[in-house]
Amino acid sequence: MLLPVIMAGGSGSRLWPLSRELMPKQFLKLCGDATMLQATLARLSGMAAELPLVICNEEHRFIAAEQLRQLSQLNHNIILEPAGRNTAPAIALAAFWARRNGDDPLLLVLAADHVIQDAQAFQTAVQRATKLAEADQLVTFGIVATAPEIGYGYIRRGAVSAVSDAAYSVAEFVEKPNRAVAEQYLASGEYYWNSGMFLFKASVFLAELAKFRPDIMAACEQAMTQTEPDLDFIRVNKQAFAACPSESIDYAVMEKTDRAVVVPMDAGWSDVGSWSSLWEISHKDQAGNVQLGDVLQHGSSDNYIFAETGVVATVGLHNTVVIQTKDAVLVAAKDQVQDVKHIVQQLKQAGRSEHYIHREVYRPWGKYDSIDNGNRYQVKRITVKPGEKLSIQMHHHRAEHWIVVHGTAKVTIDQQQQLLTENQSVYIPIGAVHSLENPGKIPLELIEVQSGAYLGEDDIVRFSDLYGRV
């Protein structure tokens, strides 16, 4: 039995300003109409596999759940990490969960934020690896190198595996090299890019983890003995997991075990680690430009231009990345996009919010867009999905006006209910206990005008909530 384990944690900053801490790249549509998480799930189509197990951060739980729901793959199969502890503990949680009923499936460990352009080649490599995993080998997938990349770690292959001539023993894992060393690796033909994808029995991984990192093993086992059900989420014991050391699977197990084998994969793989790598794998026009959104270019070439709102125009621009979102604009030389992380660090140090959250924020009931704000007021456009309901809540420091622009709103204020339709409005005083619900079959859209001395999102007292946020 094959159990896909999708690691969807992390909140990288390399694709800022599209990627934010509350909306990292695995939940974005960067290559096509599906998000990266959904594309990862889609490339499993046709394989004899169980419903995937997704591991993500607590703060991303509703985004992950909604994206699985859209693919009809949501069924109590999201493990929530109380804190980031790298890949070895995350995979250990999945392995313990997989073995809870005495089963011992093959775990196909995948990252949610990688691009694989050839799904068939990917599936073929997994099929080749299955025989090895069933023979108690720990399989890692080595990407056939096509360039002397300095942004990837590498795997040096050893002798052909005794189990299958489609694999090699792992001679060593090596860190990211400099350019000269990377060119030597490419020329030798003995090195693969380290993809971070694996296939092994749950029991074999746990046995090797117990051998080399019993501290991680014990902490994760303790965390999984006290799981709590919560909607479609699996909550592990927070205190036990917080005590777990942070370590990658490479350092914890793969570099130490004598069971490691590498299966080559040539499937158009990229970890999309920068705007330049996204430009490389995207469709380009005759001038080498990638254009997404309302973009006009004149005398420009080899650019990556993304426009979220309004028109973005370039004249005589070359080898440049321009990313325009509702609240930020990035302009960067394409060969220096790795330094975007320094801008993110400046935002953090300045106490700003643009590294953390988008202007448009997703919630389990829908989303809101902060369209205007000033001294003692804020304006939001709120969208509530059919049948969904916001928490019963109260604010200490702000009053609110709601104006319905589309659909029907069921509003409760201090236990008094009323239905509002298009162009109708209601006032919620400071301190009033209130809730908002969409009883209809179409999305509810309304404008919310907040006014008061403090307008922060933490000025919410929740009395009841469908999503466990009380």
Image: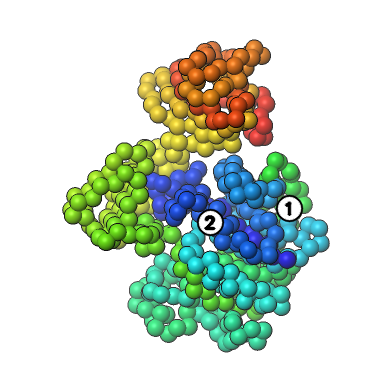
Residue 46 is situated, as x and y percent measured from the top left of the image, at 63, 63
Query: Seen in the image, is 319 located left or right of residue 117?
Result: left
- Where disc 1 sits, the SS reads helix
Q: Position of residue 310 (x, y in %)?
A: 31, 38
Which residue in the rendered view is the most extreme toward the right? 102
The residues tagged by marks 2 and 1 sit, at their Cα atoms, a distance apart of 29 Å
Kindly identify the residue that appears in the image at 31 percent across and 44 percent down: 294
Which residue occupies 68% across, 50% down? 77
| Mark number, residue 39 | 2
Residue closest to the eye, 70 or 144: 70
In-image side of 389 versus 312 (left or right)? right
Q: Amino acid at mark 1?
A: Met
49, 103: nearer the viewer: 49
Residue 326, how many percent across, how many down?
Answer: 37, 37
Q: Which labelled disc corresponds to residue 224?
A: 1
Is residue 153 at all visible to an observer of this figure? yes
Give whichever of 28, 242 is nearer the camera.
28
Residue at horizontal 60 percent and vertical 49 percent from the top = 71
Asked if disc 2 and disc 1 are in contact, CB closer than 8 Å, the reply is no
